[in-house]
Image: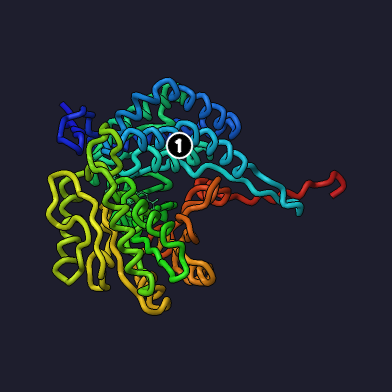
Amino acid sequence: MSERLASFDPGNGDLLGEVDVTEIGQISGVVAAAHAAMTDWRSMGIAQRAQLLDRAYAKMKPHMNELARLLSREMGKDIGRAGGEMNWVAYGGPQMAHSACEALQGRDLGTGSRIEYRPLGVVAVISPWNYPLAMANNLIVPALVAGNAVVFKPSEETPLIAQAFVKILNETLPHHVLQIVHGNGAQGRELVDGDVNMIAFTGSQATGKEIMKRAAGGLKRLVMELGGNDPVIVMADANIEAAARFAVASSFENAGQMCISTERIYVDEKIADQFESRVVEIASSYKVGPWDMQGVNIGPIINAAQHGKIIQHIRDAELKGAKILLGGSKQPERYINPTVISGMTPDMQMEREETFGPVVAMSRYVKVEEAIERANDSTYGLGAVVFGNRDAQAVADQLEVGMVGVNQGPGGGGDAPWVGAKQSGVGFHGSEDGHRQFAQVRVVSNRQQSSEE
Ligand code: NAD
């Protein structure tokens, strides 16, 4: 009998269900079946693939409430946020398919040559638990539209919602074009080492580095969206109310378990007293609790290891002299109450590492150059935000990140790329350029021979 992977409600530890773990020895067969399925899939034509995805996603619509409920219970985010993620997937999936379809059309260069975007082969999509469907969907859709077959390995924390998603899509998609492999890092490693042509990964920086090493032997194509340690700089001429609201909302979103959540705030000392006290007031109004509690906006932490890491970061800050303005290192099981600290210094884990919890961590600066230097003194480079007026854009221009927002969050609207700089990513997805990373670019030059030659 195969091993089972159990999934629990992070808010109370209740068993929600189980799936079969994919045995390591079965993974090469899964990948071989994906290669075999590609023959028909790639010859189908890109517009038909996008249309088929439309039909596949349409079958999700009658099940939106039950899917949102499952996502909410399994990951821990409240039902409103889970509904938002389901909408992004079910309605955004077909839109993404159509923009990928446009981006991947061949085109003439006007010189007797043309560019084609051809499938790469089998794409391994490996995803995290914090946005268990959205993150996977962002990679699965362009990979399929480009004519690749996908083997999807969801996080071991959220197998049930991933299984439900794949089951619905597979009512419409041809056999083996989209398959799922369940397990943890061991299954992920086996897949990366297997006969796959591309790895599209969202997850931590440490796992990304291991995947890159393993993929090097076969020079496999990589798109990797990795962790962040996003800074916010609040300048003296900022709208303090707007900056404080953003600081709290972005630090606490998804219980802080978001790649672009605010992790460190540098505030001009001239406005720091006012800013800090407003942050504490706003943070105090946040409600902590399980997925179905009325008005909740901070859910449970995904597992005990992550819970322990957040407490460790708060304790480290306490020991190194930070001032705890709200919350602190004494926390209940499974949850972290809103925590606000001031006096963060560069030697603290909070400044150097991704905390991934509902903590607002602040530090004062005298000169903005100091804030810019500390913001950039990181291996991460995902997002950053500047609140201010006259020189805010000039400060934003100096930040070493893939996405920067001025007086708003990072990440553009519409079909903008989702992209990390430095060690927060390799390649990217979203936008014409992003969709094209799921295809092999091919230049075809064809000189028609005349009968006289
Ligand atoms: P993780 O790296 O621990 O795991 C991600 C996935 O990789 C899981 O499916 C896991 O089973 C698998 N895995 C683990 N080890 C592997 C290996 N050696 N080879 C192949 N696969 C392996 O990350 P996580 O804890 O699930 O997710 C949280 C992290 O993801 C945070 O760092 C967060 O910032 C990041 N993240 C980034 C983005 C982005 O767009 N940049 C979005 C969401 C999450």
In the picture, measured across the screen, residue 140 lies left or right of residue 319, that is right
> Which residue lies at the image location 30% right of the left edge and 39% below the top edge?
77
Quarter of the image for residue 231 reads bottom left
Instruction: Out of 50 and 281, give the one closest to the viewer.
Output: 281
> Which residue lies at the image location 48% right of the left edge and 38% below the top edge?
141
Quarter of the image for residue 219 reads bottom left
Q: Position of residue 407 (x, y in %)?
A: 48, 59
Does 34 sit above or below residue 107? above
From the image, which quarter does the N terminus lie in?
top left
- Judged from this view, the residue extending furthest toward the right is 452
Residue 73 at least partly seen: no
Q: Secondary structure at mark 1?
A: helix
Does 218 sit above or below residue 385? above
Instruction: Out of 269 and 43, give the one closest to the viewer.
Output: 269
> Which residue lies at the image location 20% right of the left edge and 67% below the top edge?
323
Instruction: Out of 305 and 232, give the one closest to the viewer.
Output: 232
Q: Position of residue 254 (x, y in %)?
A: 32, 45
In the picture, measured across the screen, residue 18 lies left or right of residue 220, that is left
Give the residue type at disc 1.
Trp
| Picture colour scheme | rainbow
> Which residue lies at the image location 41% right of the left edge and 47% below the top edge?
200
Does 278 sit above or below residue 188? below
Which residue has dot 1 on it?
A: 88
Pointer 1 local density, CA inside 10 Å: few below 14, some 14–19, many at least 20: some
Residue 387 at least partly seen: yes
Q: Position of residue 170 (x, y in %)?
A: 41, 25
In the picture, measured across the screen, residue 159 lies left or right of residue 396, that is left
Count of picture labels: 1
Pointer 1 residue Cβ closer than 8 Å to ligand 1: no
